[in-house]
Structures are given as structure tokens and as C-alpha cells.
Image (tube, grey):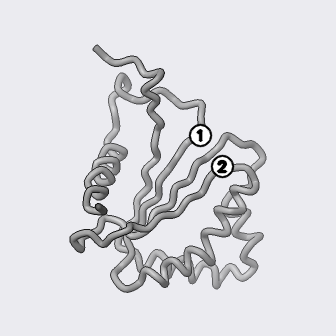
Amino acid sequence: MYRYWTFPVLLLTLAASAPLPAAQRPAPQASAETTWYFYKVKWGFQDEFLDLFQRNHYPVLKALQEAGQYSAIRTYVPRYHGDGRADWTFAVELVRREATGVPTEEEVVRKLYPDQARFRQEEARRFEILEAHWDVPLNSLNFETRKPAR
């Protein structure tokens, strides 16, 4: 089952990285913006990565959600290893909402982590054990209101 996920994720990643001509760009959305953050962790370091993410980055995301920047934060791991060449090992879905007066991520980090040296060291380690990381901002597509190009 997992194997079928890698191909659409790869297509989404490639499509998101290629600029579209102005006529093909989706219209700006008035609703929430969703972004998927994908991580591929080096083999054998998944638990360490999850521990570091949960201790250092997840609280930042939750604080930003409580401040109104995100309406939803969801995390995912693949159900199966597939054929051994998984494209990602951890994903985060962030649904951003329009908000004013929300603190910056840097402000939240300074407030949550008084020991900035330790925080920076652990964050450096979290990225050291990654093989890859990419972000995929998504535009919603509503087929109820979309007019086909003919």
C-alpha cells in the first residue's frame, strides 16, 4: 500500500518545484493554506529524530497554533516500509490561517527554550540525521466551483 504513495508524493514535489506560467497558476485562495513538510531520516535514527522533533520543534508549532497561526497540525509516518526505498519517513501537515499579531517562530523559540545553546545543538543534530527534507505548499482545488478549460 505504501508503495503507491511514493509516486504521487514525488509528482507533487516535482510539480510544486516547477514554476507555472501566469496563465496556469492557480488563483489565490481565500481559505487556509496547507503545507506538507517531508523528512527522510537516515536509517536507524528514526526514534532519535522523533524525540528531537517532539522535544524541540513540536512545542513551537503548538505555541504558534495556540497563538492563531495554524488551525491544524498533523504528523504522519508511513504504514509500511514498501520496497525499502521510502521517499519519506516523517511528514507534518500544517494548515495556516490568516492571523494578525501572531508571534514569530524566533520569538516563540526564545520564550520556550531559555537554554538557547542546547536548543541550537539539538536542532543541529535533528537536521544532521536527515537524508532529505522538502516542503510542499498545496492549493486546494474545488471541483464544485472549478470551470474546466475547454
Q: Residue 114: x, y in percent?
A: 75, 79
- Read off the residue under disc 1: 32
Q: Nearer the viewer, residue 77 or 96?
A: 77
Question: How many marks can you see?
Answer: 2
Residue name at image x 39 percent, y 70 percent: 89
Secondary structure found at label 1: loop
Say which residue appears at 43% left-offset and 80% top-offset.
Answer: 46
Looking at the image, which is closer to me, 8 or 16?
Answer: 8
Please tell me whether residue 104 is drawn above or below residue 111 in the rendered image.
above
Image quarter of the N terminus: bottom left
Determine the CA span between mark 2 and mark 1: 8 Å
- Label 2 or label 1, whichever comes before in sequence order: 1
Task: Identify residue for label 2.
Answer: 71
Q: Residue furthest left?
A: 83
Left-right relation of 124 to 11? right
Q: Position of residue 4 (x, y in %)?
A: 26, 56
Left or right, 129 with respect to 10, comes to right
Residue 85 vs 46, above or below: the answer is above
Left or right: where 59 falls relative to 138: right
Instruction: Determine crowd level at label 1: few under 14, some 14-19, many 20+ residues with C-alpha closer than 10 A.
Output: some
Q: Which residue type carries mark 1?
A: Ala
Q: Are marks 2 and 1 in contact (CB under 8 Å)?
A: yes
**14 w.r.t. 5: above or below:** above
- Residue drawn where x is 55% and y is 74% of the image: 53
Residue that appears at 52% across and 63% down:
75
